[in-house]
Amino acid sequence: MTDSGTQLFEELDPQPRLLMGPGPVDVYPRVLRAMSTPLQGQFDPQFTEYMNQVQVLYRQVFETANHQTFLVNGTARAGIEACLTSIIEKGDTVLAPIYGRFGHLLKEIAMRAGANAVSIDTEWGQVFTAEQFEEAIAKHKPRLVAISHGDTSTTMKQPLAELSAICKQHDALLYIDATATLGGNALPVDELGLDMVSAGLQKCLSGPPGSSPITFSDAVAERLLKRKHTEAGIRSAEAEALEGDGPIIQSNYFDLPMLMDYWSPKRLNHHTESASMLYAARECARLLLEEGLTACQQRHQLTSKAMRAGLEAMGLELFGDPQNRMDNVTGIFIPEVCGDGAALRAQMLEDFGIEIGTSFGPLDGKIWRIGTMGYVCHKANVLRCLSALEMTLHRNGFKTPQGAGVDAAYQVYNNS
Amino acid sequence: MTDSGTQLFEELDPQPRLLMGPGPVDVYPRVLRAMSTPLQGQFDPQFTEYMNQVQVLYRQVFETANHQTFLVNGTARAGIEACLTSIIEKGDTVLAPIYGRFGHLLKEIAMRAGANAVSIDTEWGQVFTAEQFEEAIAKHKPRLVAISHGDTSTTMKQPLAELSAICKQHDALLYIDATATLGGNALPVDELGLDMVSAGLQKCLSGPPGSSPITFSDAVAERLLKRKHTEAGIRSAEAEALEGDGPIIQSNYFDLPMLMDYWSPKRLNHHTESASMLYAARECARLLLEEGLTACQQRHQLTSKAMRAGLEAMGLELFGDPQNRMDNVTGIFIPEVCGDGAALRAQMLEDFGIEIGTSFGPLDGKIWRIGTMGYVCHKANVLRCLSALEMTLHRNGFKTPQGAGVDAAYQVYNNS
């Protein structure tokens, strides 16, 4: 019956890859299988119970007692925008410290949400000191500070404890983008006193992009409820009485008070929950919690250590401040003989099926980024990547001592 | 290694359902399987080729030559907001004719995007006449008219040809929310002269919620590019030269000019494409095109006809204007003896595993909605639903002639 001239293309059949770039990484097969589970309706008692379970699971992942812990239906960036757009009111001063691409992004989203968005900068490859934060916060008196826990563009991780304390002293809220770090790096939300946090699945959580777990405190929830405006088409007399008198949030899709209702026993309809992605997010959390948060972080630390030892033994230079590296991605300077590194990356992909990345902006063509996260964060992949890299570097004219990278990685594992 | 006290819950194991509510409906198994396909990186040449194929496939689904045809990463509502937030500039007059819940939604999203949002209303269960449109457009002179093709809350379908002609006469753009209709009801975008259209997967396309195919004309694209502001963290000198001088779009995630770059050969990074949902969307389109657009629409027409004949033969009263019903969902008045109908719906779900819906706002507890769409739109499901409904109505004290519903449905099939 196919109409004539229709272009259908072939059945989906991607070649196998080993994804060792900055993300997405290979999805854990249990998560892939979870996504092929048949659906239930969004108000089916079994399905809403799965929604409740997702909340319990992510409270454990975020190490928080925050009641408001749920999924935003979109990629990690959707979670960022839901948090910022809902908390920011027009004219609020928002400080977005920039230590990589994602600082620019947070500043821009804040600006689009109507904030007076200000920033401080540091060189890409460094993080901020407590003094720098203290000075900027005292000067700008922001209502909100927005920063990434780890910025994949530079592979750096910003320590958060002192920043959080400074924010509290100055009565500023603290939003953290944990997309790149959650699961592979410690992020005890309550212990750190973080007000709002969002993440994604496609890094250390071994899931696909497309769902964003978020969490925020009761105090934030209370502020958000002042901006509650339930959709006219479903507003009941009961909802009418609970309308906030604050300014309406500029997005309907990212309106957190409405999402809070959807994720509450009221189940007041908003979007139609992306069930397959919820199944994925649920399985990602189960896998992480089954392994244990600390065990998973240690696996990321050990694997990065082995990868870095291997890279250095091959004569490559690691990028960025050694004290503040993320535990799941490593930057290395592209050797001069490899130019902007694109040819070598293409060979790694085409000839060995291994993906590694470059970066953005000032680091585009200057560094390679090698991810060792989630399902990919294992010894066999470190050794595969190092040996393929040795072969490929060799073909591109960069000489390394034969087997040195793999030997150094072995040594790290043997001593662990 | 699991930390003590961790709550993991059981393996995902939802009971089987037959989803005959207003959506989501059962996902076609080929689509479920597509989602379990391993990932590739977002800039992998094979993956970007899949992105290109998705564009070609959805041009055929939308029956359009629009170059700008791609996916928004979120549920159908995300696609709506991406279109409206990107095209609307502060102060624009936007007309959102309201004939059900989703008219309210479009008006609200327009308002949140800064529009002077105006509306006209008609009784739920009716659609608008060309005269009503003409009068409202002449009066308000909107820059944009935004309306749903089908409003699931009322099961009504708005004819669009005359509206489109009126919009052209008055130089107004026309945005159509086709979430509820695409695939099961004719929607030849170019023939109808629609400027922007968005949809979802979870209705007639037999997919899960979580991806929104959209399309818009070159003229719309040109207008949008005046508002192009590339993210600071990835803005090149080349991009700098192409910045628009129009007001920045208030959302980063829904910024269509940036999405246009991401879906172009430039592949300028924005979000990280939700690959699993893209695989799903690709398979949904392949299934529809394999069957043929006309054949699929005819299947929906015939199935609805059989379902309606069965419902009427059981003594139930169909809801809404018979001339303008959607071909994929049917409203029926809840018999008085069934109260608000919730108990019967729960029995249908718990005892027969069949989900049917009620509606929102003025129709909440007044009508049931029975969907026959996508993978569910087949004779066996009509007969299953009618027989289960007869049994359940009987137990709730509503008497029907034995077997009358199924017989009437058989008759429709036998005469087809």
Image: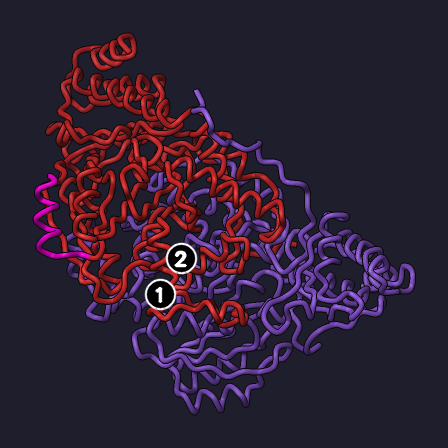
Chain colours: A red, B purple
Kindly give the residue lying farthest to the front in the view shown: A169
Q: Residue visible at 32% across and 35% down?
A: A188
| Chain letter, disc 2 residue | A
Report the front residue among B172 and B15: B15
**Residue B234: % across, % down:** 20, 50
Q: Which residue is mark 1?
A: A249
Q: Nearer the viewer, residue A366 or B58?
A: A366
| Residue A138 included in the magenta stretch of the image | yes
Please state the horizontal and vertical placement of residue A257, each as a whole percent of the image. Answer: 42, 59
On the picture, is A330 further left or further right than B395?
left
Say left or right for A138 vs B407: left
Instruction: Give the quadrant of the N terminus of chain A.
Output: bottom right
Question: Which residue is found at the position 75% from the left and 53% from the top?
Answer: B347
- When the figure is inspected, residue A5 is found, relative to residue A401, above or below; the finding is below
Mark 1 secondary-structure assignment: loop
Residue A263 visible within the image = yes
Q: Residue furthest right?
A: B402
Q: Which badge, 2 or 1, is on the more N-terminal residue?
A: 1
Residue B288 in view in this figure: no
Q: Which residue is mark 2?
A: A256
Q: Could you tell me the amino acid type at mark 1? A: Ile
